[in-house]
Amino acid sequence: MSDESELIFVSHAGRDRQWAEWVAWHLEAAGYRVELGLWHWRAGDDFVKRMNEALERASAVVAVVSPHYFEPGRYTEEEWRAAVARRGRFVPVVVQQLERDAMPAVLASLIRVDLHELPDEDAAVKALTDAVRGPARPERAPVYPPAAAQGPHPRFPAAASASAVWEVRRRRNPHFTGRDDVIGDVRRKLLAERHAAVQALHGTGGIGKTQVALEYVYRFAAQYDIVWWIDAEQAEQIPVHFAELATRVGVARPDAGVEANARYALEFLRSRERWLIVLDNAEDPERLETLLPNGPGHVLLTSRNPAWGKIVPGLRLGVFSRAESLAHLTGQLPSLSDRQADDLAEALGDLPLALAQAVGVLSDGMPVEQYLRVLQTNTAQLLDHGKVHGYPASLAASIAIAQDRLRDGHQEAAALLRLASLLGPEPVPTGWLVAARPRLTTAPDDPDNFRWPQNALNPLARYGLAVVGPDAFQVHRLTQAVVREGAEVDDAGALWDDVAALLTSVDPGDPELPETWPEWSVLTPHLVSTLDALGNRAELRHTLLEAAKYLVRSAQPHAARKLAETLHRAWAATLGEDDPDTLHAAHRVTWAIDWLGAHAEALPLVQDLLERRRRVLGEDHPSTLDSANDLGVTLGQLGRYTEAHAVHLDVLERRRSALGEAHVDTLRATTELASALNALGRWKEAHRRLSGTVEAINSVLGEDHPEALGAKICMAATLHGLRRHAEAHRINADVLKRAQLVYGAEHPETLSATYRVALSLMNLGRYKEAHEIVTDVLHRERAFLGPDHPSTLHSAEKLGLLLVQLDRHEEAHEVLSDTLNRRNRVLGVDHPLTLDSTDSLARALNFLGRHAEAEELVKGARSKARKLLGDKHPLVRAITDTLASALAAQGKLYEAQKLRSAASTRKGGKRRR
């Protein structure tokens, strides 16, 4: 026996799981502790973390090596590289012939064992154990061949090249791609049952159910003595196939009929082991249930009909993952660029049959760009082009066949399919159909038909035209396109009326509130998909504007801008530039641009919108004051603090006059004015404005409302300015806790709240904690917002200042130099934040002893800041202090003292950091 403390980690590619289990079994039988992901890692575990932990603990790595092991993109590369880097023992166990030079050079010199060349299992077990720890005899050898595939003893993978009874009239697909997880799930679930193990693969047309079943058959053929494939679409022919099986296994009686011999075959299977029956395209569970074999073997069936799930365990097969789509396309069309492959996969909805047909068309010489254009205009014609290996019909033909069946006795379902074809390809909640039913011409007239829409959805699922769940259904985008092209022109107007009625029946609520976002996320894609046809419908304009607001508030500014600009162009052309709805659309455009941080681009749009609203609606109209508030915010973002303050003061006075002191819009205007006062360094005045306002907003809207959180943030900034850092930290910590619950961990508002907590810690002198938080925030903001977004640059500057405080001056200089360069480019050299970055970099230079450079850097900045902000502004005082420090360090004591004396005569405290 081996030392029990010795742990072996078994590394393998997904396709070699059978070999991996065999290796792990025999290593455990030889006395080793083994870690194999298939046996020891649960669903929900962090795969990468578990892998790294296993590699750390293991004394050796046994790699199940085949051509799959070295395929690009597999985690196996990380495993063998990590094992080599740790200089641990790495034992290659080769289970399939490798091409010349297939083994990476760094592994080529390792002694390996070639199991695939050995004559039998005994020799393979001996070679394996010898390779790991030298010759050893297990205490108890597994049965060979094992008595049952489901037993605890795994069968040697190379035990047989083919099953004793084999009836599979389909060739293996040489271009089969991906699906390793699905095939692994099928295998595990079949092995988990001791008797009569049945698994159903169900999914829509073109999803690749038959291909997965076929690959399973070929991949695990050696585990079965009987493999029998039955084309089960015609239920009446299934007894014939079982009668043929009875003849092959020798239990048929020549004088008995088909039905009797089919029963003899089923009786034979009941008493035998190691058999696999595949029922392909088994569409009628009620007729076929009695024909399912029973006994200690396996049944795998494929079907479009999800009703099998009520009878036997099942797996729903979805479209390819994007990685699988790209692998399929580039594997057969190596000249495709990554962008072209991704565009094709997106346009085809990752549907396996569509991707296979596309490969055929593109292989004939059609350029990708032309294919994509034709796909948009002549979808059905293109999808009917070419036959694909392993598929009996083209995608367009299979959809047409299913539609023909649908029209034969399922008119409600056919009507619902036509309606769904005009929506987006995303899921459609069935509750929408129920709510809109009185207004839908496609719904049945009978009000007592309480089974609608279920009665219409079930046939769609049965014929593979939709995926139907308990609360929603979904039609693939290519199915939609084929159905749309085949729809009668006369029905178009009524169908679009129904689509409009359906979408207007949905009211997710105020998009300012994050709790409404999940429902808006379902509705918005359908609104966008129908925009060309329904964008000018009066009944939908409000919903479309609210959808644009949702996209802004949920941090999807690019999508918001695209939608809002589309609405603005369309409505300006049909309603006029000054129509209130057109102006609302323009307002949404400015919001999206503001969220993108492009404030200079937003300013002329905000100014134009304000002037139009003043002219059309009047000076004191709520919408006009909304635009005036936006102007103040934009001016503040551009560093024009005095102008911003004047605008916000005017808005507050007008709100108060029209609405009263306690109205929520007045309270909001008070908060905006306080924020403008903070930017001017007038913190006492800001605190006076905010006193009572925060509590009032909490009372009116609730403490978790976005407006309430904004007021608290403003108060915390004011308290920082007043050097009441502990109070500010308590508020910021509370806001962060609430933001995480309201927005989620990754929303920009939550990242901003996290940054403010770090700022509080920095002001309290807790630099290490602040550094850790800011580093994380900056990483996430760069990924989410981009490196030049104003929020990202705020975090970058604070990181540089924290590095200064932690005496990491060279790193600080690098970070602050980059931040200053970006602010110069994005904001301009005269923006207060650019001047702030100039001061921060000069401070780092002073710490590095580069005082002359610091002096030169801040001299010009000080002049600009004085002119822009006045001598009493905190930024001016901070730059003055940095300049004085640089002068004093160079021995220019008189100049330094003169600067400091001038500054000390002015009222004010130290700069807030």
Image: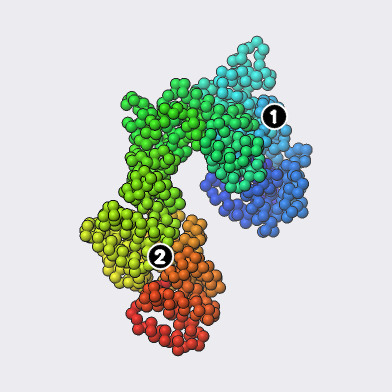
Seen in the picture, residue 506 relative to 618 is either above or below; the reply is: above
The residue drawn where x is 65% and y is 56% is 82
Tag of residue 766: none
Q: Residues within 10 Å of mark 2 (few under 14, many from 20)?
A: many
Q: What amino acid type should be assigned to the residue bearing mark 2?
A: Leu
Name the front one of labels 2 and 1.
2
Visible residue check, residue 19: yes
Closest to the observer, 1 or 839: 839
Front in this rendered view, residue 239 or 511: 511
Left/right placement of residue 10 relative to residue 411 reads right
Residue at (39%, 59%) from the top-left corner?
604
Task: Name the spot of residue 86 as percent of width and height, x first.
Answer: 67, 59
Identify which residue, 175 or 827, lies in the foreground: 827
On the image, the x and y values in percent for residue 890 come to 51, 85
Q: Is residue 487 left or right of residue 141?
A: left
- For the residues labelled 2 and 1, the Cα–Cα distance comes to 76 Å
Indicate whether 654 appears above or below 395. Answer: below
Q: Secondary structure at mark 2?
A: loop
Give the side of residue 124 with respect to residue 506, left or right. right
Residue at 77% in and 40% down: 118
The residue lying furthest to the bottom in this view is 894
* Image quadrant where residue 791 sits: bottom left
- Is 17 placed above or below 482 here? below
Q: Amino acid at mark 1?
A: Ser
Give the residue number, with chain letter if any, for mark 2.
638
Tell me if mark 1 has few (under 14), some (14-19) or many (20+) residues whose alpha carbon lies within 10 angstroms of its own: some
**Callout 1 secondary element:** loop
Image quadrant in which the C terminus is located: bottom left
Which residue is under mark 1?
163
Residue 674 occupies which quadrant of the picture? bottom left
Q: Residue furthest top?
A: 255
